[in-house]
Amino acid sequence: MRFIILCLMTTLLLSCGQQQIENQITDKKDYEAYLASTPSKTTSKYFEIWNSKIKPDSIQLLSFGIVGGEYNRFFKNTGDVKYLKKAEKALKKATDIAGIGRSGYYSALARNYISQHRFKEALQMADSALAVGGNQKSIQSLLFDVHMELGNYDIAKSNLDSLTNMSDFGYLIRQAKWSDYKGDLDTTIRMMEKAKLRAESSKNEALILWSYTNLADYYGHAGRIQDSYQHYLKSLALDYQNAYAKKGIAWIVFSYENNPEEALRILNAVTKHYKAPDYYLLKAEISEYMGDEKSNLANLDNYFKELKNTSYGDMYNAYNIDLYLNVTEQYGKAIALSQKEVDNRPTPESYSFLAYSLFKNGEVDKAKELVESYVVNKTFEPAIMFRVAEIYKAAGNMDKVKEIKKDLVEASYELGPIMAADIQAL
């Protein structure tokens, strides 16, 4: 099977030059200046003033909240998990000493836990925020976010319905997320376009940037690659350091334009200063496609070195499961970690990993039972449906494989060139 996939990849590479000409939409001149970035600042006069007010026995409540917010900003700008953990520490202290305004600190800590993939603890904080009284709409928005992460979709929908307001940015982006979960990409994009207009009219740069990058992602899923590219560029015009937008452009260059060398050059510029481990996995994937085993192994090694930091906790469980399944072939570890993910967040994705791990371990019947109970008709994510298709193929249900394969072919840009070869081999 691997030989067949490698042959298909070779064919793709041979046609690479012609496809680059046909698919070219990016221009180095558009983004070159953004690649020469410097390390993001991890301090500011604002931060220093408020941080200086915190002493070992401090009860400066406002200081903890502000410092926690600044640490969160540093995390977003650098990808360095230590700032996320420092934000957690400051916000926990704030919840301990707060009298008035405790609900807001509970909510902020809940969002911190979401970033750490500590979803059950995030729900506890959200419930605490609700219990002590706070902004009802804000807490319901938070509860929607947490329950979507936990796979409690009925509860999430109930909270979303209580927020209905077509002129509110927060409602629009959550309606977009719900529509995406339901597989309605047209409505997802329509809601995000409305949210973008609301953000632009508010002049809130953070909301504008968020709407641009998310809309760029959705445009990519819809095959509107030019629109996706333009919105990543608009994001960089607002924040030239934005690693996520650069990663998005690198994906277009790699998956749509079939130019892995340029995609890798973009990502190498990003990872000089940005610390998120998953960027190394993308670089490893591109190196594999290029047939550069040395670079592939070096990037995988960098990823595993980063993950030695226990502060990451469960944040990279899904990536690790994928590596156990498709790189190291440690199926026992994949099963154990998948079960942990199901316990943490019983979503269709978590169940798909558990089912796929069992399938790889030779337990096809159990895998088929799981996907039919917890995955099929409960998600439309292409990567998840690929796992379902492989399980159905092993079970001999080729009619369902054929049906899923058609949708997967249409999602080839989203899945990438290596996955495209795997899809053809179904």
Image (spheres, rainbow, N blue to C red):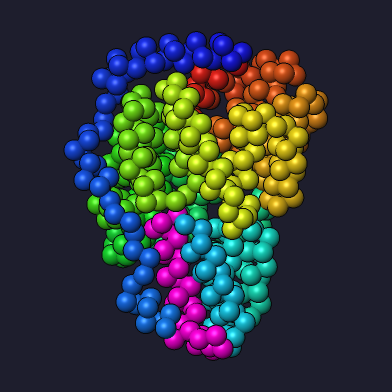
Q: Does the stretch in magenta take in 18?
A: no
- Quarter assignment of residue 379: top right
- Rendered residue at 32%/35% (across/down): 265
Q: Is residue 256 above or below residue 39?
A: above
Q: Does the stretch in magenta take in 54?
A: yes
- Quarter assignment of residue 279: top left
Apparent side of residue 349 relative to residue 331 in the rendered image (left or right): left
Please provide percent x and percent y for residue 6.
51, 14
Q: Is residue 383 above or below residue 192?
A: above
Apparent side of residue 349 relative to residue 421 in the rendered image (left or right): right
Do we see residue 58 in this rendering?
yes
Apparent side of residue 58 relative to residue 51 in the rendered image (left or right): right
- Rendered residue at 62%/28% (across/down): 326
Provide the major secondary structure of the magenta segment: helix
Apparent side of residue 278 relative to residue 242 in the rendered image (left or right): right
- Rendered residue at 37%/12% (across/down): 14
* Depth order, front residue of 103/32: 32
- Rendered residue at 51%/62% (across/down): 82
Please provide percent x and percent y for residue 128.
65, 74
Segment tinted magenta in the rendering: 53-79
- Quarter assignment of residue 254: top left
Quadrant, the C terminus? top right
Please provide percent x and percent y for residue 76.
43, 58
Please provide percent x and percent y for residue 140.
57, 66
* Depth order, front residue of 61/267: 267
Do we see residue 376 in this rendering?
no
